[in-house]
Amino acid sequence: MSTPDRRRFLALATGAALAAPALSLRAQPRPVLKAGDQKGGLRALLEAAGGLEGLGYDIQWSEFPAAAPLAEALNANAVDSGPIGDAPLIFALAAGTRVKAIGANRSDSYGTAVLVRPDSPLKTAADLRGKSIATNRGSIGHYVTLKAITSAGLKPDEVNIRFLAPADAKLALTQGSVDAWATWEPYTALAETSQHARVLVSGRGLLPGLSYLAATDAAIAAKRPVLQDFLLRVVRAQAWSYRNVDAFSATLARIIGIPPEAAKLQFERRQQRWVAIDAKVIADQQGTADFYQQVGLIKQRLEVRDTFDTGFGTSG
């Protein structure tokens, strides 16, 4: 090869080598966040608040009827992240799910409640002795059931807990095949406003009102900036929702398919706020874990401190 030809060859080869990384970068797909959700949860909030605009990643949503199947999806790495209550998170962690809480939310626990039919003769938690209660295994409804009966001096084996999904539990209550249904929002508000049920025992004073945005260890390792951005969007959307109660309630009702009065009731009384994962949050979560061990639902003590990732911020 002559010298001019060699120079021409080297120039072409160098140009191709320099261009290759740029082409590779352009070909890289956008990150994808596999987001789990529950009815009336984060997707509805973000859509109502316009919180999904300008995303630098794609979101693949999966909706679950309760926390237990969401936890199973986290365990299988079918979703990267999702909202989950304090009690279901304990169950998931005790089962070996490799997941951490990356954001903490406190709310009024009234809507996590044991419901009975409007004409039920039951008046207090003590009246549940020998009665049947429908709820999801490992759910916050399961937790409020156990808290309600033990606080009334009953033992877990003095009631008959039937594990049913929310739709089946509601049907069982209205048809009279169970005496009570332990559930959460928006199901509680929907049952009340439709006059299908009344609150026998609320979670106010029994539960710490904690819920979390949880993420798998794998997602935290691979998608930390995406998860941080998503959490901040959720925090901002929640702040917007309390500045626009009527507008948000109407949009929420439309998105999740419930009457506006039920949407507004469950939203207003929750009074949710994102809080720092501090010593109080960790102590409250440890109390939940210890209670579950005390009533025999988990076999050994779970040290919850290691189940939080405090490196995510909720301001900015």
Image (cartoon, grey):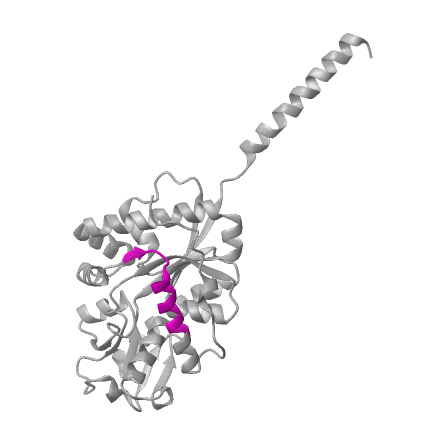
Asked if residue 66 can be seen in this view, the reply is no
| Quadrant in which residue 25 is drawn | top right
Q: Which residues are magenta?
A: 273-289
Q: Quadrant of the N terminus?
A: top right
| Quadrant in which residue 249 is drawn | bottom left
Q: Residue 161: image x %, image y %?
A: 36, 83
Asked if residue 308 can be seen in this view, the reply is yes
Q: Is residue 257 left or right of residue 4?
A: left
Q: Residue 82: image x %, image y %?
A: 41, 58
Magenta-drawn stretch, dominant element (helix, strand or loop):
helix
207 up-or-down from 38: above or below: below
277 up-or-down from 95: above or below: above
Q: Residue 109: image x %, image y %?
A: 26, 68
Magenta-colored stretch includes residue 277: yes
Q: Residue 238: image x %, image y %?
A: 27, 52
Magenta-colored stretch includes residue 315: no
| Residue occupying the point 21% across, 86% down | 122
Direction front: furthest residue: 279
Please tell me which residue lies in front, 178 or 269.
Answer: 269
